[in-house]
């Protein structure tokens, strides 16, 4: 009898130790299990799709040391990273400010202009999709 099991691991430390949650992270690589039966036939590999992360909650912003200081609650345990986006007065679309690693809960944006108003949002992202926080508006004095 021959039994072969192939598992892929990313080797990174995460909040979750749940194999199903971890399997779908890091660029969409899912764990593939292949087994060989006693007759020598291989079963086809199966993959588990990643669940999208939960949206960050309680996004708040304040003016601090010449910039906008953002804080939020990390409501998911399977995000690969967070993406901070903003748009200034008159802008139609959001622009990426920065991408931050998983488990981040704060960012200080100093690339702002006096007298302008900015709308911010935070996205939790993984291979299964993304989830967006509520938006906040900050007026720069």
Image: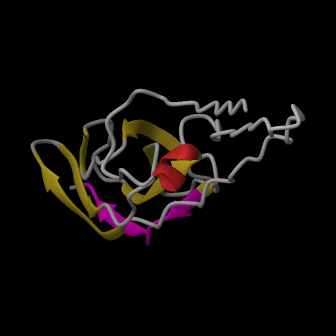
Q: Quadrant of the N terminus?
A: top right
Q: Quadrant of residue 7?
A: top right
Which residue occupies 55% across, 48% down? 126
On the rendered structure, is 69 left or right of 29? left
The residue sitting at the front extreme is 1
Overall secondary structure of the magenta stretch? strand
On the rendered structure, is 103 left or right of 87? left
Which residue occupies 55% across, 45% down? 23
On the rendered structure, is 84 left or right of 47? left
User: In the rendered structure, which segment of residues is drawn in magenta?
Assistant: 130-140
Q: Nearer the viewer, residue 22 or 68?
A: 22
The vertical placement of 16 against 67, above or below, is below
On the rendered structure, is 44 left or right of 131? right
Q: How many marks?
A: 0
What percent of the width, then of the height, locates residue 46? 77, 47
**Residue 87 in view:** no
Residue 115 magenta-highlighted: no
The vertical placement of 8 against 71, above or below, is above
**Residue 65 in view:** yes
What percent of the width, then of the height, locates residue 113? 32, 42
Which residue occupies 30% across, 53% down? 115
What percent of the width, then of the height, locates residue 50? 62, 54
């Amino acid at each position: 009898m021959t039994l072969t099991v192939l598992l892929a691991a990313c080797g990174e430390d995460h909040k979750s130790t749940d194999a199903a949650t971890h399997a779908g992270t890091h660029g969409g690589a899912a764990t593939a299990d292949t087994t060989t039966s006693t007759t020598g036939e291989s079963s086809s590999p199966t993959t588990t799709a990643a669940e999208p992360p939960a949206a960050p909650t309680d996004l708040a912003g304040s003016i601090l040391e010449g910039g906008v200081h953002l804080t939020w609650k990390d409501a998911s345990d399977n995000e690969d990273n967070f993406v901070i986006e903003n748009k200034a007065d008159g802008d139609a679309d959001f622009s990426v400010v920065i991408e931050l690693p998983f488990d981040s809960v704060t960012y200080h944006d100093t690339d702002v202009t006096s007298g302008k108003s900015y709308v911010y949002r935070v996205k939790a992202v993984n291979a299964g999709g993304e989830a967006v926080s509520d938006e906040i508006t900050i007026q720069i004095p």
